[in-house]
Image (tube, rainbow, N blue to C red):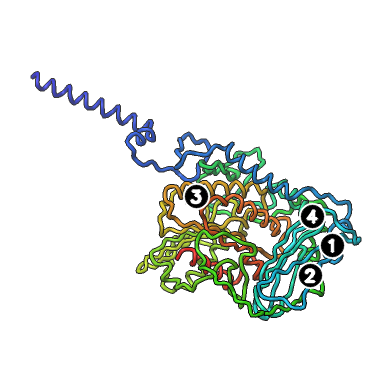
């Protein structure tokens, strides 16, 4: 009988212990899992709507104060380059037709490899010499019959004069061009207006509500008194908002699209600077053709282009529609042999999606994998199982502009994708940011780029053999909506990106300079331009 009583006591004690352990687990699961070093999975976006669940970031967060100090530092550098230029009348702004461009030390004979310099004096519509700089100029030399082109380097002396430097890369007749994209007064107006609002583009979110759909307004910033859904990147504290539909949870957001809003932060006088006839006006005039001879000069032998080489300006030139870097040579590479065994992750906008399309068109053994998404912005994956090639393209996080509906079920910032990447010598990450950020205050772009930079720092600490490549923005159509999409906005982002990433061991494909050289003026350049970008990429990784 005593033995039976002891057994009963043990069973009661065991039941109490099991109950206490179960109660602790269900009350504090993350803490207990952490204690036993078990994995805890959390959503990538923290839906901050009546949520009491704790979140554990993949990496210790950087102080928001530290991030904002870095953002302000870069912003201040840009502010110093773009001082305010108020103007009382259009006649006091820079005029392309009244400005003069003079070839310095002109010669009867120019040779391949020579430097040609042009002095530009900016004048207003009354012919008066400008005494300050800041005009947004684009210099290019070209030989259309040879399908050749290169950018020129512009030096602003901040007193109304500019030095344009051209490197004469090829022989034959060469046309010189200096375009006044925007006068300094227009540059100042665009810079001020950009910082004043987030509502030039409006977003519409689509929520699932049973068998029906509900649509509400979304934005980076929403000044609304109604209840909002906050889609927060908890690691970097970047957020996107939607008006919460009645009786529909925030997690039911599935799709998004955007449209331009009829709003402007420019005055009527400022808007007159941006009529199409005032954008991209030629300054060089009729004396813009020279003849270049070979002069029996022996071309210097250049080493093969490789990852980590210092950049130069201009970065190269186009000849017979083929890109030729200025400081190195592109070796012919068999693309399939180069890609064998590699995992390539393209992250960014549709200009990198063009790379995905190019790979699939050139490597006929790549097979697309259906990831059950729809639309042009869907996540894409292509593989060659025999050669162990894996290439994927993934869109970046908000803001993402598109009049066509796209899925946001799995949308996340690039920094989070990088944080989940193990990395090693056969992992190649290519990133392109910019075009979708142009309509918004530039601090949004700078903050995103800083956070991507820090994620890459973490990746290269744990996997220093990982190859990381940045593709800068393409120039786009001159007739584009200037206040939202001007190349001036892209150029300031280009400068900020170079500043932010200068200390990282990353390769750079200078698509900005390349697309000026090609003279494409198209956000989605033709395939031969994309192919030239990929030729540099292949030389970097093989």
Residue placed farthest to the left in the image?
Answer: 1
Q: Are marks 1 and 3 in contact (CB under 8 Å)?
A: no
Which residue in the protein does label 4 denote?
133
Distance Cα–Cα, label 4 vs label 3: 37 Å
Q: Residues within 10 Å of mark 2 (few under 14, many from 20)?
A: few
Disc number lying in front (4 or 3): 4
**How far is disc 3 from disc 2 in space, using C-alphas?**
47 Å
Q: Nearer the viewer, residue 258 or 59?
A: 59
Q: Residues within 10 Å of mark 3 (few under 14, many from 20)?
A: many
Q: CA distance from mark 1 to mark 2?
A: 25 Å
Residue 182: image location, x then y, percent: 77, 59
Q: CA distance from mark 4 to mark 2?
A: 24 Å
Question: Circle 3 is placed at which residue position?
Answer: 456
Instruction: Report the residue marked by disc 2.
Output: 105
Q: Is residue 90 left or right of residue 31?
A: right
Q: What is the CA distance from the residue labelled 1 to the residue labelled 3?
A: 44 Å
For label 1, the crowd category at 10 Å Cα-Cα, with few meaning under 14, some 14 to 19 and many 20 or more, is many
- All told, the count of numbered labels is 4
Tag 2 secondary structure: loop
Q: On screen, 347 above or below 284?
A: above
Question: Mark 4: few, some, or many residues within 10 Å (few <14, many ≥20)?
Answer: many
Quadrant in the picture for the N terminus = top left
- Cβ atoms at labels 3 and 2 below 8 Å apart: no
């Amino acid at each position: 009988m005593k033995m039976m009583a002891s057994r009963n006591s043990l069973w009661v004690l065991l039941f109490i212990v099991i109950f206490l352990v179960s109660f602790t687990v269900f009350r504090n699961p993350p803490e207990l899992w952490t204690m036993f070093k078990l994995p805890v999975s959390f959503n990538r976006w923290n839906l901050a709507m009546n949520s009491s669940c704790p979140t554990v970031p993949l990496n210790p967060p950087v102080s928001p104060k530290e991030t904002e100090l870095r953002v302000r530092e870069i912003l201040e550098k840009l502010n110093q380059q773009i001082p305010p230029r108020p103007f009382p009348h259009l006649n006091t702004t820079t005029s392309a037709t009244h400005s003069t461009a003079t070839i310095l030390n002109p010669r009867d004979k120019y040779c391949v490899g020579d430097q040609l310099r042009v002095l530009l004096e900016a004048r207003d519509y009354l012919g008066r010499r400008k005494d300050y700089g800041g005009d947004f100029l684009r210099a290019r030399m070209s030989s259309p019959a040879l399908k050749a082109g290169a950018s020129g380097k512009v030096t602003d002396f901040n007193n109304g004069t500019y030095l344009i430097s051209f490197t004469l890369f090829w022989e034959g007749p060469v046309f010189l061009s200096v375009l006044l994209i925007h006068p300094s007064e227009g540059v100042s107006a665009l810079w001020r207006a950009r910082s004043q609002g987030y509502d030039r583009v409006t977003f519409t979110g689509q929520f699932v509500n049973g068998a029906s759909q509900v649509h509400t307004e979304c934005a980076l910033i929403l000044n609304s008194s109604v209840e909002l859904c906050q889609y927060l990147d908890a690691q970097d504290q970047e957020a996107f908002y939607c008006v919460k539909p009645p009786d529909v949870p925030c997690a039911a957001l599935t799709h998004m699209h955007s449209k331009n809003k009829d709003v402007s932060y420019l005055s009527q006088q400022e808007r007159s600077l941006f009529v199409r006839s005032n954008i991209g006006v030629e300054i060089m005039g009729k004396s813009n053709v020279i003849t270049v001879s070979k002069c029996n000069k022996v071309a210097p032998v250049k080493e093969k282009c490789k990852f980590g080489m210092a950049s130069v300006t201009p970065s190269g030139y186009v000849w017979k529609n083929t890109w030729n870097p200025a400081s190195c040579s592109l070796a012919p590479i068999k693309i399939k042999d180069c890609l064998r065994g590699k995992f390539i992750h393209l992250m960014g906008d549709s200009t990198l999606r063009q790379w995905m399309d190019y790979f699939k068109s050139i490597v006929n053994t790549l097979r697309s994998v259906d990831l059950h998404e729809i639309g042009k912005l869907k996540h894409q994956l292509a593989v060659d199982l025999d050669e162990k090639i894996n290439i994927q393209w993934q869109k970046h996080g908000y803001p993402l502009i598109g009049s066509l509906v796209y899925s946001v079920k799995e949308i996340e910032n690039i920094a989070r994708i990088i944080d989940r990447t193990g990395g090693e010598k056969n992992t190649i990450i290519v990133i392109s940011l910019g075009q979708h950020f142009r309509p918004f205050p530039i601090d949004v772009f700078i903050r995103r780029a800083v956070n991507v930079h820090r994620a890459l720092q973490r990746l290269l600490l744990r996997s220093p053999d990982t190859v990381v490549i940045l593709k800068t923005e393409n120039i786009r159509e001159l007739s584009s909506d200037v206040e939202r999409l001007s190349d001036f906005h892209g150029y300031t982002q280009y400068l900020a990106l170079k500043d932010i990433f200068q200390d990282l061991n990353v390769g750079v494909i200078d698509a900005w300079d390349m697309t000026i050289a090609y003279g494409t003026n198209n956000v989605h350049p033709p395939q031969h331009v994309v192919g030239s970008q990929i030729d540099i990429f292949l030389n970097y990784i093989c």
